[in-house]
Amino acid sequence: MAVNIAGMKMKNPVMTASGTFGCGEEYADYVDLNRLGGIVVKGLSLKPRLGNPPPRIMETAAGMLNAVGLQNVGVDAFIEEKLSFLRNYNVAVIANIYGESYTEYAQVAGKLSAAPGVHALEVNVSCPNVKKGGLSFGADPKAAAEVTRRVKAETHLPVIVKLTPNVTDITVIARAVEEAGADAVSLINTLTGMSIDLKNRTPHLKNITGGLSGPAIKPVALRMVWQVAQKVSIPVIGMGGIMTAEDALEFMVAGAKAVQIGTANFINPRATMEIIDGMRRYLQENKIKSIKDIVGSLRT
């Protein structure tokens, strides 16, 4: 079950998705953190951020919408107050980062690179570029590449770029960040959606729109992982609606070398443990020696 993502060794390919697992401490009573392949912590910014006003979470027919607004304690507080807890466990720690400018991305990366206990950086390029009228960094191949270059210049750690699905062709963005030096890509982030209160004719979310996650987006995520895996030579980490071991395995067949579990953690705090057990059972029952043997094995 062991995998190696850009030099980062993990005991299995199952990671938690940023924003759904806190910094690990919140789930320590429910799961054995040592059994996880990796923990991707909640997104970190240069300064503390309060996030968006409520309501900011809305359940949908096959998932959920969130407009939390990247609320977090800030990178300095994470290093000083949260990271020591994670150092107690034998698990890869991936710090998810974001910024409102190229400089902010670089500054956050530099701070984390100097912090013992961080094994990789995941760069969220779904944030709005204020200087470009709010267009997401990840929707512009040149901007996504520049973020990647700035982060790479500040760290010796593996850099994973998390791609937004809210683009015309995600493979163009994937290739741009690969050329800029990304060590891996993770996808997909949430799809933009909205929900309406028909009685009052108002949006359910104060922010009006939010990010859709959960089973509803799995077919889109699978398709995008499959497309990207054929276009890049760096590792692909798949996510988007993974609820079961079967879901996770489908992403690996499509070309992902590892997976991230997100919304499932809210529904079942032990989802990651059950997925790890289910994947191991699948390999045993089908006499497959290594998880690597199913990566990209889709027959078309």
Image (spheres, rainbow, N blue to C red):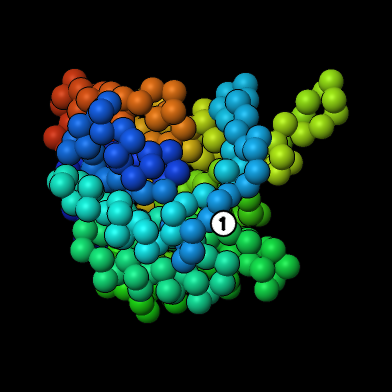
- Judge by depth and name the residue closer to the eye, 193 or 21: 21
Secondary structure at numbered mark 1: loop
For the point 23% across and 48% down, the residue is 86
Q: Is 162 situated above or below 219?
A: below
Q: Is residue 149 left or right of residue 119?
A: right
For the point 38% across and 69% down, the residue is 109
The quarter of the displayed image where residue 89 is located: top left
Quarter of the rendering occupied by the C terminus? top left
Q: Is 138 situated above or below 297?
A: below
Q: Is residue 111 visible?
A: yes
From the top left corner, tell me how far across and down residue 104 is, in percent: 50, 72
From the top left corner, tell me how far across and down residue 242 is, in percent: 42, 31
Q: Residue furthest bottom?
A: 153
- Name the residue beneath numbered marker 1: 126
For the point 26% across and 71% down, the residue is 114
Q: Is 52 situated above or below 153?
A: above
From the top left corner, tell me how far across and down residue 52 is, in percent: 63, 47
Q: Is residue 283 left or right of residue 141?
A: left
Q: Amino acid at mark 1?
A: Ser
Quarter of the rendering occupied by the N terminus? top left
From the top left corner, tell me how far across and down residue 218 is, in percent: 51, 33
